[in-house]
Structures are given as C-alpha cells and as structure tokens.
Amino acid sequence: MGTEIERKFLVTGDFRPFAASQHRIVQGYLTTNRDCTVRVRVMDDKAFLTIKGKSSEDGLERAEWEYPIPVADAEAMLQLPGIQSLAKVRFKVPIGGHTWEVDVFEGANQGLVMAEIELGSRDEAFERPEWVGEEVTGAPRYYNSQLLTQPYTCWS
C-alpha cells in the first residue's frame, strides 16, 4: 500500500512559462464515496486504475494504489453506463526540488486551475511559487470526484 501526501492550491498567476511538460487526461470514477474512490485514467498513451482510501481529517493524507492497465481497457471502462468523466490538461512544473502538477480543467469545470504537490512527509518543506494562491487541501468541493456532480461552472 502506498500513502499519498498531497497539498492542493488554487492557481492565481501564470505558471506556463515554467512548465516542463503537459499531458491530456480523461478520467472517470467507477465508485466514489467518503471511504473509497476507484478511478480509471487515460493520460496521453497510458492508462491507470487507481484506488484511494479515505482522506485524513485534514485531507492531507490517504492510502493509494495505482496500477497500469491497457489503454483499450481504460477506454472501455470510461464508456460503461453510469461512469462520469472529466477532462483536463496537466502541466508538470519543477520548482525547488519538487514537481508541481497544475491541472487546467475543461468542459463543465472550465475556468478551474489547481496546483498540487506531493510530499514525502506531512511536514516536508517546499517552495511555494508566486503563481500559487489559496490552499484548498481537504476542501471536498475541489476533489476531482466531487467536480463530476458539482462542476465548477455551477458554483455561485
């Protein structure tokens, strides 16, 4: 079992000049509840099945398992009845020994831009770039699984 330790932030400035790469992502959720989410993701020419456990109280940490799967299988899963999906472009931005992942959402979540950084421990220091704004770690409305049912463009 792996443990994901991650912090999320809204993006308020221009990060693109610092991006080292970008990847198109389509992901769908086979199940979403407070205790477990199961996600299938196609990123460029690769695919993954990811299971995430319940988040800690502060939303910073949770169990995570991720496995590569054939792209054809992932695409078939995304077509299953009842599977909701979202699309985004992920930019990888190296800053101070870490790689920030900046997601620019599309479709019903267009206009939402979030950055996340994975850490090795809860108290690991990191450089916070000037284009990063408010921290939203642990705020459920910003979970990808929640953006399916309450998309950003519907927020008031």
Image (cartoon, rainbow, N blue to C red):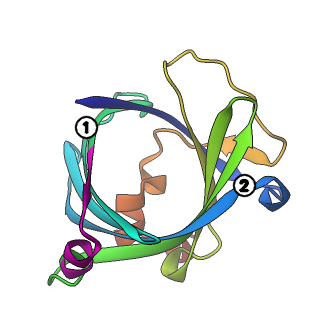
The percent coordinates of residue 148 (x first, y second) are 37, 70
Give the residue at the far top of this rendering: 123
Instruction: Determine whether, in the image, residue 131 is placed left or right of residue 21.
Output: right
Q: Is residue 87 above or below residue 35?
A: below
The region drawn magenta spans 66-76
Which residue sits at x=56%, y=67%?
23
Give the labeled residue for mark 1.
54
Q: Nearer the viewer, residue 100 or 60?
A: 100
Q: Is residue 127 above or below residue 39?
A: above
Which residue sits at x=35%, y=60%?
145
Q: Secondary structure at mark 2?
A: loop
Q: Is residue 129 above or below residue 109?
A: above
Q: Is residue 154 magenta?
A: no
The answer to whether residue 57 is visible is yes
Foreground label between 2 and 1? 2
Give the mark, 2 or 1, whose residue is nearer the N terminus. Answer: 2
Q: Secondary structure at mark 1?
A: loop
Instruction: Determine whether, in the image, residue 118 is placed left or right of residue 104.
Output: left
**How many other residues sit within 10 Å of disc 1, few (<14), some (14-19) or many (≥20)?**
some
Which residue sits at x=23%, y=52%?
37
The percent coordinates of residue 43 (x first, y second) are 44, 67
Instruction: Determine whether, in the image, residue 51 is placed left or right of residue 149.
Output: left
- In the rendered image, the quadrant that contains the N terminus is top left
Query: Do the CB atoms of the residues marked 2 and 1 lie less than 8 Å apart?
Result: no
Give the labeled residue for mark 2.
20
Q: Is residue 46 above or below residue 32?
A: below
The percent coordinates of residue 87 (x first, y second) are 47, 75
Q: Amino acid at mark 1?
A: Lys
Q: Is residue 72 magenta?
A: yes
